[in-house]
Image: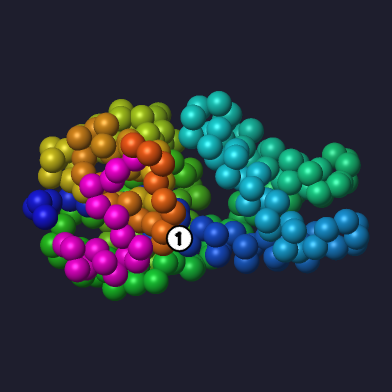
Amino acid sequence: MKTYTHLLFDLDHTLWDFEKNSEETLYTLFEEFELGAFNKFSCSSFYRKYKFVNNVLWDLYNKGKITQKELRELRFVKTLTGLGLLPHEVPKGISEAYTDICPTKTAVFPYTHEVLSYLQPKYGLHIITNGFKEVQAIKMSASNLHGYFKEVVTSECCGYKKPDKRMFEHALGRINVNPKDCLMIGDNLECDIEGARLSGIDQVYFNPEKTKPKKGQKPTYEIHCLSQLQEML
């Protein structure tokens, strides 16, 4: 394996367990906003529908087809109207409540802290994320991740989103390092892996679900558990 000096980590779905934290938040919102009173869907159906809608909207956001404001405004409207509510029945404030609660959740993937503690003395560790600056800062603080990282680069701050190579170039400039000396670790084959590859950065595809990549998608390395980083690096 090549020698690297800096490691770039994605945050959501790679270190911070977005699905678990989001599910906990949505179950709370189901109760607080009394969504069961409509008798049209269950709590689990609400979670599954939201997950689908949110993934679609984030894909559009990453491609620059919708704004942050549109993403936040649309995800609960599309979820709840898709489950049978009329637009005027969508509870006011539910999107804001989600944004307030979810980032304070603390679940991270197994071995996150052990691996980061192992890597920190050996490498410069950095975050590169398409998430929003304020929200990502809350997540990292709540889950005790801030102390491991020197730079946190968000798309909101640099003006570009992964997989745009300009975001990676911006991060490399902030760190003052050459692409060949960096390794990107992320869960998204398009944003993290392809974006890094186009920027001349080797990649580790974090694939806990063991999803088969599409034809032509071949990351430099692939892992199914973060503990494997400790074996590799």
Q: Quadrant of the N terminus?
A: bottom left
Q: Is residue 199 magenta?
A: no
Q: Is residue 29 left or right of residue 112?
A: right
Residue appearing at x 25%, y 52% in the figure: 221
Q: Which residue is mark 1?
A: 209
Does the rendering let one see residue 165?
yes
Residue appearing at x 23%, y 47% in the figure: 220
Instruction: Give coordinates of residue 28: x percent, y percent.
Output: 70, 66
Q: Is residue 5 left or right of residue 37?
A: left
Instruction: Give coordinates of residue 124: x percent, y percent.
Output: 18, 54
Give amino acid for label 1: Glu
Residue appearing at x 28%, y 38% in the figure: 196
Along the line of sight, which residue is nearer the eye, 222 or 63?
Answer: 222
Residue 130 is drawn in which quadrant? top left
Q: Quadrant of the C terminus?
A: bottom left
Instruction: Give coordinates of residue 71: x percent, y percent.
Output: 62, 37
Q: Residues within 10 Å of mark 1 (few under 14, many from 20)?
A: few
Q: How is the image coloured?
A: rainbow
Residue 145 is drawn in which quadrant? bottom left
Does the rendering let one see residue 96?
no
Residue appearing at x 68%, y 56% in the figure: 48
Instruction: Give coordinates of residue 13: x percent, y percent.
Output: 45, 55
Q: Is residue 173 left or right of residue 40?
A: left
Q: Is residue 85 left or right of residue 161?
A: right
Single out the residue that lies furthest toward the left: 3
Element type where label 1 sits in the image: loop
Give the extent of the magenta segment. Answer: 217-233
